[in-house]
Image: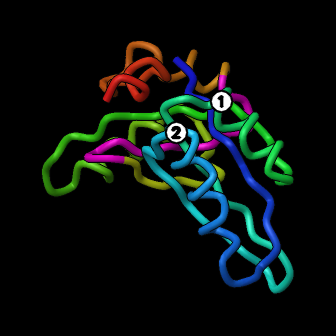
Amino acid sequence: MKVHQLSVFIANQAGRVSEVTDLLGSAGVNIRGFAVSDTAEYGILRLIVDKPDEAKDVLKHGGFTVKESDVICIDLPDQPGGLASVLKIVAAAGVNIEYVYSLIATYVVINVGDADRALRLLEGQPVRLVSQEEISSI
């Protein structure tokens, strides 16, 4: 179960994130989660949305550079230590996390070097993976 993440490359200027979110909102695309990282000149806005194909088209037509990648979404136990318990499982399975951020409720996205390999390693582990369809139906 892979989830589609959109990475939008934006100039590090006031209002650029607002432009992206306005385009998506106007197109009826719901943002389920996001993370922003930046340098002095540019930023990367990572998005999980309910309609990734539509979002990608809207953003490209809006003049933004967009990259789509596959990530994994895990439903965390909603309790103290829930994140730690899942990250221990992921680490013990030999999966290296490149970055992590949270979505709605207790969902978190993890980006790994090889999503297919990570999914195989996590198969049978006590983590609940979340599909793109589930994110889209929330």
Rendered location of residue 47, percent (x, y): 58, 48
Point 24% across, 48% down: residue: 82
**Highlighted range, magenta:** 104-115
Q: Callout 2: helix, strand or loop?
A: loop
Point 40% across, 37% down: residue: 89
Left or right of 86 in this view: 99: right
Mark with earlier residue (2, 1): 2
User: Which picture quadrant has residue 130?
Assistant: top left
Rendered location of residue 25, percent (x, y): 51, 49
Q: How many numbered discs?
A: 2
**Callout 2–callout 1 Cβ contact below 8 Å:** yes
Q: Which mark is residue 29?
A: 2
Alpha-carbon distance for marks 2 and 1?
A: 7 Å
Please say if 80 is above or below 128. Answer: below
Rendered location of residue 22, percent (x, y): 57, 58
Point 31% across, 30% down: residue: 138
Mark 2: which amino acid? Val
Mark 1: which amino acid? Glu
Q: Callout 1: helix, strand or loop?
A: helix
Point 39% across, 34% down: residue: 74
Binning the other alpha carbons within 10 Å of mark 2 as few (below 14), some (14 to 19) or many (20 upward) gives many
**Which residue has dot 1 on it?**
54
User: Which picture quadrant has residue 44?
Assistant: bottom right
Left or right of 123 in this view: 86: left
Does residue 108 belong to the magenta stretch? yes
**Colour scheme shown:** rainbow
Does residue 7 belong to the magenta stretch? no
Left or right of 71 in this view: 122: left
Rendered location of residue 122, percent (x, y): 48, 23
Q: Nearer the viewer, residue 99 or 95?
A: 99
